[in-house]
Image (cartoon, rainbow, N blue to C red):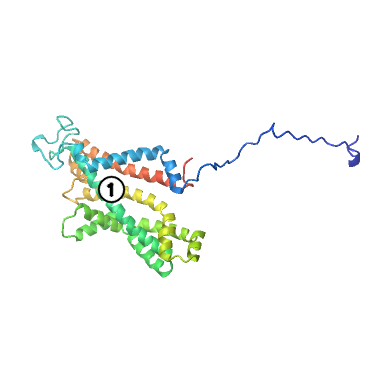
Amino acid sequence: MRSDAPRSLRPAAAHVVADLSETPLQEVDAVDTTTAPRSMWAEAAHHLVRNPVFVISAVLIVLLLVVAAVPSLFTSYLPTAADLAHNNQPPGDGHLLGTTVQGYDVWSRIIYGTRTSLTVGFVAMILSTIIGVAIGAFAGYVGGWIDEVLSRITEIFFALPLVLGAIVAFTALSNGVGTMTIALVLAIFGWTNIARITRGAVISVKNQDFVTASTALGASRLGILAKHVLPNAIAPVIVTATVNLGVFIVAQSTLAYLGLGTGTVSWGGDISDAQPALRTNPMMLFYPSLALAICVLSFIMLGDAVRDALDPKARKR
């Protein structure tokens, strides 16, 4: 029959439908309804334990913490015991990494220097986080002229270089510069990043529906900030605080390299003392530099792993 024949005269087309049992449908984006969904922190922990970067950095940090807490387990020499009769010795004869020009045991100096660096880093990180979270959360949640004033103050401190501000502060101090003093000064000049990130996170969270619902139910502003806003805005703060710990350790070593914080064993001070013998004995400078690099790298790697776990957009799949 010709193709231009009337539709009623054309033969009916055959419609074949396969049986459902012969073509089973595959599950797409299936959801497991037998178990309760994970919270944000449980999901982050689930990804962290499977991240080799986190595992390696966590192992290194735990080892550093053990060394800092109980240094006597790793060396029998005191870091301040000088033996001029056996100065500038190569590794061996009871000295794992040799001795310095002053006769100090290099290995014991590195072991005890771990305590100084981690103490300054953790104390400065905790203090700066408390200051930054308080200022950033208050500025972001209240807003208005209070936000403007606190933001301008934050920008003033942000413009001050961390190490330069610490040097000026130490110059003004008449007493000796101890470990706690270094940590306090670094915290005073190092809270600005935390404040800026906290402010931005609080501003994004305070406009969410659950905050509006809490306000409608009559909850106080301080209660909403403490119970609802901050817990949902704390993730980027944790990441920044972890990275800042490494920054503070580098700053402390820099200050020790410049001669500030005398009286304490520090990697930065040992690097400075090893400079005159750089050509004749370069390993005296290499050992404390390697310890500093491993310590800082561990915290930076930990911060990157935590960021990937807490931020689904940045998570590596």
Tell me what residue is drawn at x 89 percent, y 41 percent. Answer: 7
Q: Who is closer to the viewer here, 23 or 96?
A: 23
Residue at numbered disc 1: 249
Above-or-below relation of 286 to 260: above
**Residue 297 in the figure: left or right of residue 28:** left
Q: Who is closer to the viewer here, 181 or 171?
A: 181
**Residue 263 in the figure: left or right of residue 30:** left
Tell me what residue is drawn at x 31 percent, y 59 percent. Answer: 160
Q: Who is closer to the viewer here, 26 or 284?
A: 26
> Percent x, y for residue 181?
22, 55
> Percent x, y for residue 216?
50, 65
Above-or-below relation of 154 to 119: below
Q: Who is closer to the viewer here, 17 or 314?
A: 17
Please indicate, yes or no, whether residue 156 appears anywhere in the rendered image. yes
SS for tag 1? helix
Tell me what residue is drawn at x 22 percent, y 39 percent. Answer: 285
Please indicate, yes or no, whether residue 190 appears anywhere in the rendered image. no
Count the marks: how many?
A: 1
- Write down the quadrant of residue 159 in the picture: bottom left
Q: Amino acid at mark 1?
A: Ile
Above-or-below relation of 169 to 38: below
Tell me what residue is drawn at x 65 percent, y 36 percent. Answer: 25
Residue that lies at the very extreme toward the left in this rendered image: 85
Q: Quadrant of the N terminus?
A: top right
**Residue 200 in the figure: left or right of residue 285:** right
> Percent x, y for residue 182?
23, 54
> Percent x, y for residue 143?
43, 66
Q: Residues within 10 Å of mark 1 (few under 14, many from 20)?
A: many
**Residue 228 in the figure: left or right of residue 132:** right
- Write down the quadrant of residue 154 in the picture: bottom left
